[in-house]
Amino acid sequence: MTPEFDHIVVGGGSAGCAVAARLGEQPGARVLVIEAGPSDRDIRVRVPFGLVHLLRSDRRNWKRKTVPMAAAGGRAVSVPRGKMLGGSGSINSMVWFRGCRADFDAWNVPGWDSDTVWDAFDAVEARMSPARLPNPHPLSEAFGRSLAANDPNAPPTPERTSAGVFHCNMKDGARWSAADGFLRPSGAEVMTDAEVAHVTFDGARATGVVLRDGRALHARQGVVLSAGSIESPMILMRSGIGPGANLRAAGITVHVDAPGVGANLHDHPGFGLHFKGSGSGYGLTLGQLPMWALSPFQWLLTRSGRLSSNTVEAGAFYSVGDGDAPDIQTHFLPFLMGWQGRSIIWGAGYFADVCLCQPRSRGRLSIGRDPYAPLIDLNLFGDDHDLDMMVKGVARLRTLLADAEFGRRRAPEAFPGPSVTGDALREVIRTRAGTAYHPVGTVALGGPLDATGAVKGVQNLWVADASVMPRITSANTNAPSMMIGWQIGGHVATQATRKAA
Ligand SMILES: Cc1cc2nc3c(=O)[nH]c(=O)nc-3n(C[C@H](O)[C@H](O)[C@H](O)COP(=O)(O)OP(=O)(O)OC[C@H]3O[C@@H](n4cnc5c(N)ncnc54)[C@H](O)[C@@H]3O)c2cc1C
């Protein structure tokens, strides 16, 4: 017999866990969360610095890549996505930002104005307890003071020019993901290592899902897709909901011709400066080897030391465009990182990047001959404006770093090097930039979705994750993804309660 639930949530990531928490509030409801990856019970998930290892894992990272992108020098760039309970929130840097109020007002979707979502963020933060990173490196503290008139204990904010040590979703020096804050207390049943192939329908009504191994599961009240910005549109397309011509070319029968599915793909472009010098930040040097050797014990006993670092410790928001509102975000990492294909190299140093808060380039995600291999075209720098802003951003970042009180820890710029400016800098950014790992927009509210997150043209099917953002928020996207799960989960629960009454 096909197992039956009230609701099925596909994807146990940042948003899916918040959806499960809302659905779990209904007395007696049977909620199933299906997750393609394993559980998050792994020491590398708990230890903040563990993300460096997780990014290399084939089992816990989908390791997607874009197609070669013409405006970015014909390159493919990597698109890491978490694959386990907690989703990308189990491999991320835990940096916590709501975004700007103006971000949500610009969505112009009923029920998603800044006042409403600010209340939802309050509810999310009551469970996630974001707080200042406990043991920042002195370089991060110094960078956090680089823009005057900012309260040193407040995080920087995209609302105004500001710098500071970041606030993070950690508890007792360990990662505290949406799986901890929402899923475990929810009472939902959880199935791991189970990848959803497609949604099943009875006419226009969604009735459940089929897994990639052929097993079917039934949902009396409906299905919520929370598989993230890359996989949720893929599940919709495999279910016959997407751009008709693309589906037909891929050999899929069209159920609903929805051109907006997969469209509007965008992310924050990012380009980093690397600084290398002895006696600077964290790195692999003979002098630092004893501290690295001691660091596991230090973390286990006192939750301090270099393993307690989330790597992305501090940052800033500032403007290089026409207005006063910040248009650039910088992440500061007190670590030497590789810039020639290897992530770990000998030496010590630090890293700071330039990310564009509101890129204009828009790409598309489509389905090809292999229905499990998304064709991800971010169209990075498809709009020249984005590259212009990045070049200005790097110039401003160099002055910020030059003014920061790094003292004896200051190191020279090793990549791309201080002499690389003007057209040469533009070319390096075009051919070396990546993204901040914040893809959004592929199943947008007001596009293929109505304002409650319901898929237009069918019943009992919702999408709730970062893919629903019509336009990206002006900072990191984890907290907004949880807020989205919380809000749409609430709408789904309300519909179920109304039906039961
Ligand atoms: C390396 C990295 C660092 C980042 N750092 C930060 C940061 O510091 N701060 C911040 O705010 N944001 C950060 N982000 C972004 C942030 O983590 C994401 O925006 C957020 O987690 C997206 O949430 P989501 O619910 O949309 O998707 P996810 O959290 O990715 O969840 C989707 C889940 O669905 C599962 N899934 C997918 N397909 C299927 C299927 N077919 N069947 C079943 N399950 C499926 C996945 O395995 C995954 O668990 C980072 C992202 C990455 C990758």
Image (cartoon, rainbow, N blue to C red):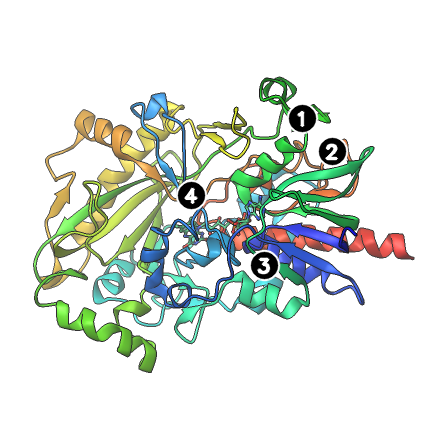
Location of mark 1 (residue): 258
Residues under labels 4 and 1: Cα distance? 35 Å
290 up-or-down from 157: above or below: below
Q: Secondary structure at mark 1?
A: loop
Location of mark 4 (residue): 325
Q: Residue at x 66, y 59 (%)?
A: 20
Is ligand 1 closer than 8 angstroms to the Cβ of mark 1?
Answer: no
Task: Tell me, yes or no, whether the two marked residues, 1 and 2, touch with CB atoms within 8 Å.
Answer: yes
Residues under labels 3 and 1: Cα distance? 30 Å
Which labelled disc corresponds to residue 456?
Answer: 2
Whichever of callouts 3 and 1 sits on the residue coming sooner in the sequence is 3
Q: Quadrant of residue 180?
A: bottom right
Residues under labels 2 and 4: Cα distance? 35 Å
Whichever of callouts 1 and 2 sits on the residue coming sooner in the sequence is 1
Location of mark 3 (residue): 121
Q: Quadrant of residue 255?
A: top right
Whichever of callouts 3 and 4 sits on the residue coming sooner in the sequence is 3
**Left or right of residue 74, residue 415 in this image:** left
Q: Which residue is nearer to you in this view: 214 or 284? A: 214
Which residue type carries mark 1? Ala
Where is residue 103 shown, x and y percent of the image? Answer: 53, 43
Badge nearest the viewer, 2 or 3:
2
Q: Which residue is nearer to you in this view: 359 or 179? A: 179
Where is residue 396 shown, x and y percent of the image? Answer: 25, 42
Which residue type carries mark 2? Lys
Q: Residue at x 63, y 70 (%)?
A: 185
